[in-house]
Amino acid sequence: LSLESELRRAVEQEAFTLAYQPQLNLEQGRVVGVESLLRWQHPEKGWISPTVFIPLLEELGLIHHLGEWVMQHACWQLSQWQQQGVCSADQPLRMGINLSPMQFAQPDLAEQLVRAVSQHQIQPRQIKLEITESVAMQDPQASIALLHQLRELGFQIAIDDFGIGFSSLEYLLRFPLDSLKIDRAFVKDITRGRRDRAIIKSLTSLCQGLNIATIAEGVENQRQRDYVDALGVTEIQGYLLSQPLSADDFVAWWSAFQ
Ligand code: G
Ligand code: G
Ligand code: MN
Ligand code: NA
C-alpha cells in the first residue's frame, strides 16, 4: 500500500501515539513541562517523521481529525498523570501541543481545544500551544486576534522554531506570547561561534523585558546547557535531558531525575 493509503488507514484506526519530551526550568531546577510529539509507525517502513506525514495529513484533509485526537490524547494523558499523582497542584506539569499551519487556520480550533480540556478536566493554562513563527506571520492581524482569543480562554502560547524570519522580530514580539522557543540551529554551534551567542543573548534580554519565557531547543550536552544558562534562557529541552519518551518511560525518567 502507498504511504497515503496507509496513512488514511492509520487515521481511521487511530494508530498513532504521542511521545513526551521534558522541559527543565533552569532557575527552579524543575521539570515544568513536556512537549507532546506525534508518532506513527508504518507497518513496513517503520517510524515515519511527522515532518513527512503531517504535511500529507494536511493535503489529504485529515489534519482536523487527527489534530483533535492529539488534543484529546494529550489532555487525557495529563489527567491520568494527575490521578496517578505524577503531577499535582504543588508539582504542576504543562503539556505542549503543536499546531500545524492548517490547524491554526481552522475556524473551530478554539472549540476543539476547549472540548479537549473540559472533557478531561484540565485547566487551559496547563496547555501550551506551539505555533511556528512563519505560521503566525502569514496573516499577522488575524494571528494576533486568534492568539488573544486563545489566551483569554486561558491557553498558553509559544512560538516554535524561532529564528528564521529575523526581520519580523520586533513585530512578532507584539503578539500575545508566553514563550519563545529558540530553534536548535542557534544552540547547535553555540560553543564555537560568537554570533549565535549574541543572538540568544539579545533574544533573552528582549523577552525578559516583555515577560516572555525563552526555551532553548536541541540542548544536547552540558556545555551547551551552561552557555544558554549564562545567556539567560529560562528553560531547556533536548537530548541532554531526554529524547521524547513514551508516557510510562517519562514517568520513570522523571522520578529518577528528581
Ligand atoms: O519529534 P520530531 O522531530 O519528529 O517532530 C518533527 C516536527 O513535527 C516538529 O517540529 C513538530 O512541529 C511536528 N509535530 C510533532 N508532533 C506534532 C503534532 O502532534 N501536531 C502537529 N501539528 N505537529 C507535530
Ligand atoms: O519543531 P519542533 O521543535 O516542534 O520539533 C521538535 C523536534 O526536535 C522533535 O522531533 C524532536 O525529536 C527533536 N529534538 C528534540 N531534542 C533534540 C535534540 O537535542 N537534538 C536534535 N537534533 N533534535 C531534537
Ligand atoms: Mn514544537
Ligand atoms: Na522547534
Image (cartoon, rainbow, N blue to C red):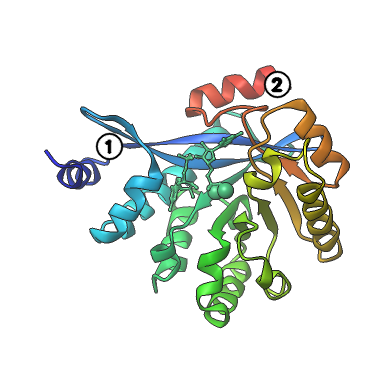
Quadrant of the picture in which ligand 2 is shown = top right
* Residue 158: quarter of image: bottom right
Specify the farthest residue to the bottom: 141
Picture quarter with the N terminus: top left
> Seen from this angle, which residue lies furthest top?
256
Measured from the top left, where is residue 196 in percent x and y?
Answer: 76, 49
Q: Which quarter of the picture shows residue 240?
A: top right
Q: Which amino acid does the dot numbered 1 rest on? A: Ala
Q: Point out residue 234 in the picture as x, y percentages from the top left corner.
A: 79, 46
| Residue 23 placement, left or right of 65 | right
Q: Hey, what amino acid is under mark 2?
A: Phe
Queried on whether the Cβ of the residue with tag 2 lies below 8 angstroms from ligand 2, the answer reads no
Q: CA distance from mark 1 to mark 2?
A: 30 Å
Q: Relative to 181, is 78 on the left or the right?
A: left
* Numbered mark located on residue 257 in the image: 2
Label 1 sits on residue: 15
Q: Nearer the viewer, residue 100 or 171?
A: 171
